[in-house]
Each structure stands twice: as structure tokens, then as C-alpha cells.
Amino acid sequence: MAEYYELRELEGRAPKLFGVATGTKLDEMFYKVEMEGERYVKKPLGGIPYLAVINLTGIPDSGKSVLAEQFAVAQASAGYKVLIVTVESPAHFLYTSLKQKCAAMNADFNSVERNIVIIDASESDELRENPRALMDTMAYAIREKKVTNVIIDSITGLYEHKEVMARQIVRQFFNFLKKWRQTGILVSQKRSAQASESAEAAGGLAVAHIVDGTIVLDKRLIETKWEMNLYGMPIGSVLRTIRIDGCRLTGHDTRPWVFEITELGTVNILKPLDEFIRKSS
């Protein structure tokens, strides 16, 4: 028999609305609206919404993994447990990358070491091809290590040769993260034919339709004199943008923002694209 609820019955189960810090300006780009006196006021949420499952998508080298790792370090250095499921890169390569992130973010690496748990699916056909086996392993790690945040990099690697099943597989992991009350980041890869600025990724819009929100990262190579004049950047340089494509849990800034990947390997969000263009003209 199907369950149904009166809205009032769900109050005790509804999650609190607050931010889970990413260590970037994204923490100010999600917001909530509160009544102050006789008017409504927008207040920064302080991160991605608690218990949200967020899709990070973009073309290769747009900064997806950099941002996901920065989120992991920000949370781990604050004392929260983070589970990283690495599907693309072998786990031991993450050690060096995360250690460098800690140095760049002035984070205590000893604390981060203790608070990040890694499942290596990159070299395990069983974990990549069998969602149930991977979710059982994740459940054990979440339970034993008291994990509160999960990153899967990338979710695309779990349906690499069977994109027709993308929606089914993404739905399974989305429901899993909700059941275990995790704040989640799913990194998804684009195919070459897909528009770089859209939320679409391998498997179509399977990820974007199911998750709570999507963040799109993009990069543009400055190739013409017109682009050089528009953006105030020399030919051959790279313009990077980040945009919250949507989030059904809370308000958010929908504008494209210009960002850079610093020499130390961190995401630094600078200003809205329109302001960047006005300043350069």
C-alpha cells in the first residue's frame, strides 16, 4: 500500500537549511531568505545546502576535480569526515594532490589525513561495474568512519560503456546518499558534442535531472582579437567561468562568475562575468 503524508507530518524529518562550506566564494553564492522586521533579506548560506547532492560538470580541465578536492579539504580540516570514491585516478595519486591543497589552503594536513577516507574504484572492475557492491562498500565506510560528506569522482565512470543506464545508476546513488544523510558531490564528464556551458553531461541530462543542483564549470581559449578586446585578456590565455545552473533546495546566484585556478592549485572565484567585462572595456 502506497504511503502518503500530510505536510505537517514531515516537519520532524525535514533537514535544517544551512551551508556546508566549500572553501570558495560558492559559500556566498547560495543563500536563504529571512524576514527581518517588515522586509525579506537574502543571507549567504555559507556553503552548498546541507544534505544536498550536487552535480559538478564541465569539459576536461575545467576545474571539477580541483573544486571537489578543495571541498574535501575544507570539510576535513573543519573536523568532518569525507569519503572520496575515486573512479578515474588511482587512490595514491590523491595523497599528493590533497597534501598540496592543504598547503595552499593553510590547512592542517595531519587533521585532513585523519578525516578523509578513500575508496579506490579506479582499478576494481567489480566496484565500477556493480553499483550494489560499491554502495555496500560505501555504506560500511560511512558507518564505521562516521562520514558526513561523499564525493564521487566521477559518477560518469560508473556507466562509462552503458550510458543508456545512466539515469538508473545515478538514481541509485542519489537515493543511497539521501538514505545515509550525506552531503554529496557527483563529478560528471561531458562528451565532446555537448555544449560546454550546459548542465548536460555523459548520459544526457540524467545527472542534472535527478540531483538537487548543478554547478557548471567552463573554460574558453582566447583566440581572436574581438575576444581579446572583450575580456581584456591576451590571445592564448584561458577564461574560466563557474555557474550554479540550478538548485531546488535554496536560492542561488545564477550568473556566470569568472574564476582562476591559482598556481597553488586552488579555485579562486573572482567576480561576475558582466563585471569582469565592464572592467576590461
Image (cartoon, rainbow, N blue to C red):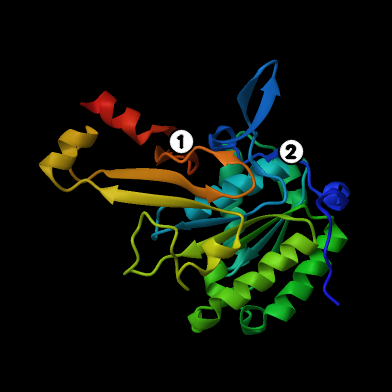
Q: Is residue 138 left or right of residue 201?
A: right
Q: Residue at x 80, y 48 (%)?
A: 14
Q: Earlier in the sequence, mark 2 or mark 1?
A: 2
**What is the x, y in percent for residue 256?**
40, 41
Name the residue carrying label 2.
Answer: 78
Q: Any mark on residue 68, and which?
A: none
Q: Element under label 1?
A: strand
**Label 1 neighbour load within 10 Å: few <14, some 14-19, many 20+:** some
Tell me the kind of residue under disc 2: Ala
* Disc 2 element: loop
Check the image and name the residue furthest to the top. 37
Say the numbered circle drawn on residue 269.
1
Give the distance between the C-alpha atoms of the residues marked 2 and 1, in whole angstroms: 21 Å
Along the line of sight, the residue nearer the viewer: 80 or 281: 281
Number of labelled discs?
2
Closest to the observer, 23 or 119:
23
Asked whether the beta carbons under mark 2 and mark 1 sit within 8 Å of each other, the answer is no
State the image coordinates of residue 112 (x, y, percent, origin top left): 71, 46
Instruction: Say which residue appears at 82% left-offset and 74% top-offset.
Output: 2
The image position of residue 8, as x and y in percent, is 85, 48
Looking at the image, is 276 positioned above or below residue 227? Answer: above
Compared to residue 222, the image places residue 200 above or below, namely below
Q: Nearer the viewer, mark 2 or mark 1?
A: 1
Q: Residue at x 28, y 24 (%)?
A: 279
Q: Position of residue 196 (x, y in %)?
A: 35, 58
* Quadrant of the image containing the N terminus: bottom right
Quadrant containing the C terminus in the rendered view: top left
Pick the front one: 187 or 106:
187
Instruction: Inspect the image, locate mark 1, and give the three-letter code of the amino acid beneath it.
Output: Ile
